[in-house]
Amino acid sequence: MIKVTDLLQAYGKKIVLDAISLEIGRNEICALVGRNGAGKSTFIHSLLGLLPVKQGTITINGSEVTNKQDEWKRAIAYLPEKFMLYPNLTGLENVNFFAEAVFGKADAPRMEDVLRLVRLWDDRDVQVKKYSKGMLQRLGLAITLYQDASILILDEPTSGLDPIGRKEILEVLASLHDKTILLSSHHLDEIRQVCTHVAFLHDGKMEKYTVNEFLESQQLGGYTG
């Protein structure tokens, strides 16, 4: 699904990603982990084609990201950490707006499906400015899911949420059995709960682990159950 080979990215003389390689298979949920400034945003922006690849290759579903063809774009949906919504529109109107912006026409049953999935259908006619932070995050996720992409890239999807808000987001992610997901995260508990693998970025290098391997390698403790 996602294959990165010998990717090098640098800002001037500062190498941020030093010939890293990573493969994320179908239906894996992979956490992108690293200290602040390790290059997580650079990596994500490279996957999305927002940063041109200096060296190496990135392929999405077999289509190269640097290719002039756009097949790979249809496979990916991206939820940034700060998702801009329209506060005076309702939740349903926000989904409708973005659906029309991307596809030209909104599909009413599809909008209902994604709002029910994130438990916002009952609040669909409430103005977004009255939503809690958790509701806003779930609405952003609903808009992302509307695209029905096979690959989701989520940048800190639970950032700033209280425990209940985080739990609600994680429950939605755990229910997405037909998606391949890369999510950046600082929270070990959510990595334990929903992820199958960890891509650990440090000192410009990247290593991929199973979740338990990562916890043990960093002396964070493995699963107890």
Image (cartoon, grey):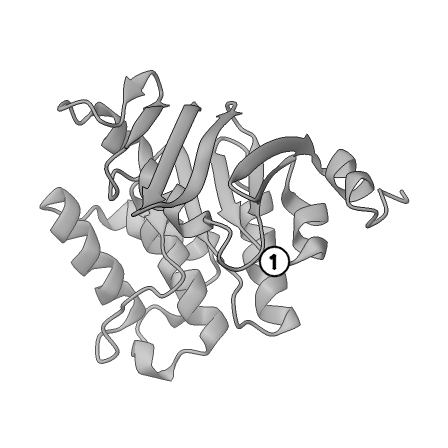
How many residues crowd mark 1 within 10 Å: few (<14), some (14–19), many (20+)? some
| Foreground residue among 64 and 71 | 64
Count of numbered labels shown in the rendering: 1
Tell me: 2 left or right of 108.
right
Residue 184 coordinates in the image, percent (x, y)? 51, 50
| Foreground residue among 43 and 187 | 43
* Residue 66 in view of the camera: yes
* Image quadrant assignment for residue 86: bottom left
The residue under the point 27% across, 69% down is: 85
Residue furthest to the right in view is 224
Q: Is residue 157 above or below residue 46?
A: below
Residue furthest to the top in view is 62
The residue under the point 28% across, 32% down is: 54
Residue 23 coordinates in the image, percent (x, y)? 50, 24
* Image quadrant assignment for residue 19: top left
Q: Is residue 215 above or below residue 90?
A: above
Q: Is residue 100 above or below residue 225?
A: below
Task: Tell me the SS state at disc 1.
Answer: loop
The residue under the point 66% across, 48% down is: 191
The residue under the point 82% across, 50% down is: 220
Residue furthest to the front in view is 13
| Foreground residue among 111 and 44 | 44
* Image quadrant assignment for residue 32: top right
Give the residue number, with chain letter if any, for mark 1.
186
Residue 53 coordinates in the image, percent (x, y)? 28, 32
Q: Quadrant of the C terminus?
A: top right
* Residue 77 in view of the camera: no
Residue 92 coordinates in the image, percent (x, y)? 28, 64
| Foreground residue among 64 and 54 | 54
Label 1 is placed on what type of residue? Answer: His
Q: Quadrant of the N terminus?
A: top left
